[in-house]
Amino acid sequence: MSELLNHAIATVNRPEMAAVETPNAMQLIQQAMADGKGDMVRELVSLQQSIERFSWEREERQAKVDFDDALNRCQSRMKRIGADMTNPQTHSKYASYAALDRAIRPVYTGEGFSISFGEDEGSTADYIVMLAFLSRAGHTRTYRKGMPIDTKGPKGNDVMTKTHAAGSGGSYAKRYLLKDIFNLAIGEDDDDGDLGVVEKKDMPMERFAFNMERIEGAKTLKELQMAYVNAYKEADTYRDEAARDNFIAAKDARKADIECE
């Protein structure tokens, strides 16, 4: 059988051999069955399965390589995207999902990619886990992003309904997923599509630690909101998205603790 399998693998690697040297597998199996050669039938069936598995694995490996190459080409063509929206609570600027989609859809669809979204089973009434499925030529990768469903504003009062908050959380998650998948950079201003470079740097560690201590040490919701808003605004001056994300997570965790106390 090993000799037959080696020949089969060579045939898979050199398709031109198939028409010349390899009989039809089903014909061989049918002939062996007609001749009453049970051992040969089992060997031929096993051989056919090995050929199919080997071929599938080779195609899957190639699909992954082509996927990575196409994703690299997308990222090389995607430029900084202008911020078109302002958060009414924090006054920070950001690029809406519509702005991101408008800028990148022609690029990724041109490379054969498609994107769809869904909600993970881990979602709860207070926390949504959004899934993004990036597909190309039969190969799909799944990305996840969790986002709290928060109806409160910076002052701790309700600013939206639960339904509105759920929609907002889903929209935020989709925006972050697009940014993560394609490693997108967001600019402060959009100069007719020709964006200048927006200075961005990390928040100094001592300032980051100071703000985290204030958020995590807050005793009341009012104190927490004040610490969070000040921290978020400071992170925004540096365009430090990582610091902002950490402040959001710390605020949500501390809020849950205070409400349980």
Image (cartoon, helix red, strand yellow):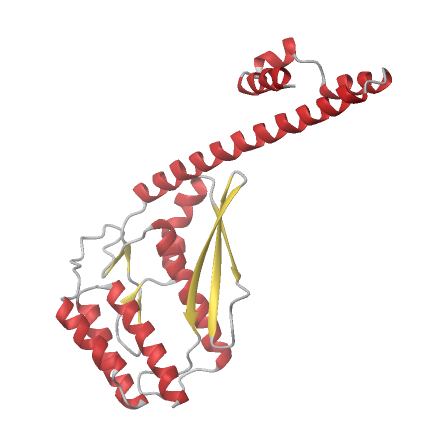
Query: Who is closer to the viewer here, 67 or 18?
Result: 18
What number of labels is visible?
A: 0
Seen from the viewer's position, the closer of residues 122 and 125 is 122
State left or right for residue 17 relative to residue 189.
Answer: right
Which residue does the image show at 44% across and 39% down from the upper left?
67
Q: Nearer the viewer, residue 114 or 98?
A: 114
Rendered position, 96 above or below 149: above
Identify whether 211 is placed above or below 59: below
Q: Position of residue 131 (x, y in %)?
A: 49, 59
| Residue at the image point whose x is 66% and y is 13% from the top | 22
Q: Is residue 87 visible?
A: no
Locate residue 123 relative to residue 21 in the image: left or right. Answer: left
Residue at image coords 35%, 83%: 255
**Location of residue 94 in the rendering, given as x and y in whole percent from the top left corner:** 30, 65
Residue 234 sits in quarter: bottom left
- The x, y position of residue 183, in whole percent, is 32, 51
Vertical placement of 65 versus 99: above or below? above
* Most distant residue in the top direction: 20
Q: Is residue 17 above or below residue 137?
A: above
Q: Position of residue 260 (x, y in %)?
A: 41, 88
The residue at the point 86 percent across, 17 percent down is: 34
User: From this viewpoint, is residue 149 visible?
Assistant: yes
Tell me the quarter of the image containing the N terminus.
Answer: top right
Which part of the image, by quadrant, shows the C terminus?
A: bottom left
